[in-house]
Each structure stands twice: as C-alpha cells, then as structure tokens.
Image (cartoon, grey):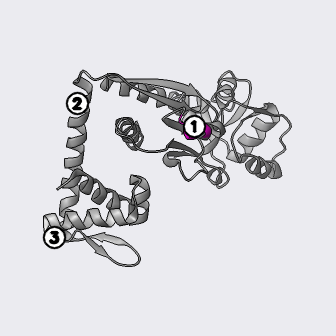
Amino acid sequence: MELKWLKTFVTVYECGNFRVAAERLFISQPSISVHIKLLEEDLKVPLFVRNHTQIQLTREGEYFYPLAKEILEKANENKQLLLTYSNSEKIQLSIALSPILVTTKLPEILYEFMSHFTNYELDIVIEESHDIDALIRLQTVHLAIGTSNSKFKDIHGEKLQTSPLVLTYPSSFIEGDKKISIILSELLKDYPMFVGYLEGIEPLLMLIEQEHKITRKNTIKESNIVKQLVLGGLGIGFLPKFLIEEELAEGRLKILELKPHMHLFPVEIYMKHVRESEQLLPLLNFIREKYNSNF
C-alpha cells in the first residue's frame, strides 16, 4: 500500500468526483482510476460505488476513510518533524499578499507557521490582487493569497474564506434602536461614505442610490485606509466583514447588513499556486487548517 494511493482515495471522496480530484492532485483522471484500483486490490475490498451521477463510499470505504486520513496525517507530521529537526538547509518561500489582508489574522498565521517550522523562511511581498497572477506565472513567488481567483488554467485557486460586504460605522454615530432604513438615511445625510477599491462594488452602490441619496462618496484605493477613516469618526465605509472582526467584537464599530444586496457581492479570499511541491505543502496545509478552524 502506497501513501499516494491513500491520498488519491481521500481526495476523490472529499472532492466528490474523479475530475476535481485529478485537478487538485495535478495528475490525470486515468491515474486517479489506477490508484483507486490498486488500493482496492491491495485491501481486497471495493471502496466506491460508482454510477454516472455521483461517487459513494461502500461500507468498507466508510470504515477505511478515517483510517486513511489518520495515516496520511501521521505520515505528514513525521515528515515535518524530520524536516524541522534535520540539518538540511533553510527552505525559503516567497509569498505575495494583497494589501487588504495585511491587517487580518493572516500575518499571525504565517508567524505561527514559522514558529512551528523553524527551517522555513518566508519572504512576504505585498501586491494588488490583479498583479499577483503574473508573479506566480513568472515563478517570482511560490504562493499568493488575495481577493480574486485566477483566470489562468495553469494556476490552481483554492477558496479559503467568503465574507459579506458590510456598511460599517462608529458605534458613537447612532444611539438607540432604530430601523435599518432610518439609520442608513441618517448616516448618508450626516457623514461621507468611503468606498474601498473592491472589484464589482459599483452595482451595489447603484442599488443603494436608487433607494437613498448619496451626497458625499469617496473612493479610496486601500480598504485598510477606509477602515482607519471610519474608526477615526470621519465617515462610514463599505468593507469586507473579515477586515473588521476585531473592532466589531470590541464594540468599536457597528454594521448594517443591507439584505439581500450585501450577499450578492461577497468578498472571497483565494490561495493560489502553480503546483503543490513537497516544500510548499506544509505551508498550504497549515493555512488550510487555520482557515477551516476559523482561527
């Protein structure tokens, strides 16, 4: 039994079909089929019930799935321990981040990774999301994390998080319990609205303008600057919710979720790379684990 067969089995089940699993593992669909066949022959039991619409685990497959996951996790842990405590040279990786992610939990995640994997050195580059793909294709960076998926087939994009776009304002601006429509009217009348440079936001602004008069609107390239302006009491702002989680928890900011409009314009965080090399895989898995656990 080979580890690559186990990885293929787990990936096929979690992806739901052979095609997506092949894309995730960067191998061909025939290779996926061969791995599953060899694993079933080695175990002497069928693992999947195959039909034209979906893939389901057999009873044996359901029993074996958590065991396969545990074997892979243990193998990866042991491999990383060997890497960490070996006398091998430092592993250097370059990572491009969108500016909007600099004040999120992501830098803490990367710092924690380096604390656990002391043989890694991470070189961080800050680039706009629309410029990141070029860096990946030129192999200037090994990994990129931004707010847009790649349009290139040779770049693998993996969604880490989806966050609603919210209208946020300082807690001191509005007192008492009022209807959302009244709050919005008062805010738009008394304060300027700052809009971060977020792709696709114009249709949302048009929807709001149909219902409310926007007298003062300022578009600012950096969402982090919008956040600081709002915290400073200089106006209200459109921001992804993930950017202000800490301020919301502390009660410094409040939000208006203008349903259903807001949910039509989610802000998504993608992790992008060309291939999962052995050196890159520990970092990818660490970031996946942190986002899946909601930090």
Q: Which residues are magenta?
A: 134-139
Q: Is residue 105 visible?
A: no
The secondary element bearing badge 1 is classed as loop
Q: Which dot, 1 or 3, sits closer to the camera? A: 1
Q: Nearer the viewer, residue 36 or 64?
A: 36
Residue linked to disc 3: 45
Please tell me in which quadrant of the rendered image residue 100 appears.
top right
Query: In this rendering, does residue 41 appear at all?
Result: yes
Q: Name the residue: 24% across, 21% down.
A: 87
Residue 9 percent across, percent down from the top left: 28, 60
Dot 1 or dot 3, earlier in sequence: 3
Mark 2 Cα-neighbour bin, 10 Å: few <14, some 14–19, many ≥20: few
Secondary structure mainly formed by the magenta segment: helix
Pointer 3 local density, CA inside 10 Å: few below 14, some 14–19, many at least 20 = few
Residue 227 - label: none
Tag 2 secondary structure: helix
Near mark 1 (Cα within 10 A), the count class, few <14, some 14-19 or many ≥20, is few
**In the picture provided, is 31 more to the left or to the right than 212?**
left
In the picture provided, is 166 more to the left or to the right than 40? right
| Residue at mark 2 to residue at mark 3: CA–CA distance | 33 Å
Q: Is residue 67 above or below residue 241?
A: below
In the drawing, what numbered circle is on residue 81?
2
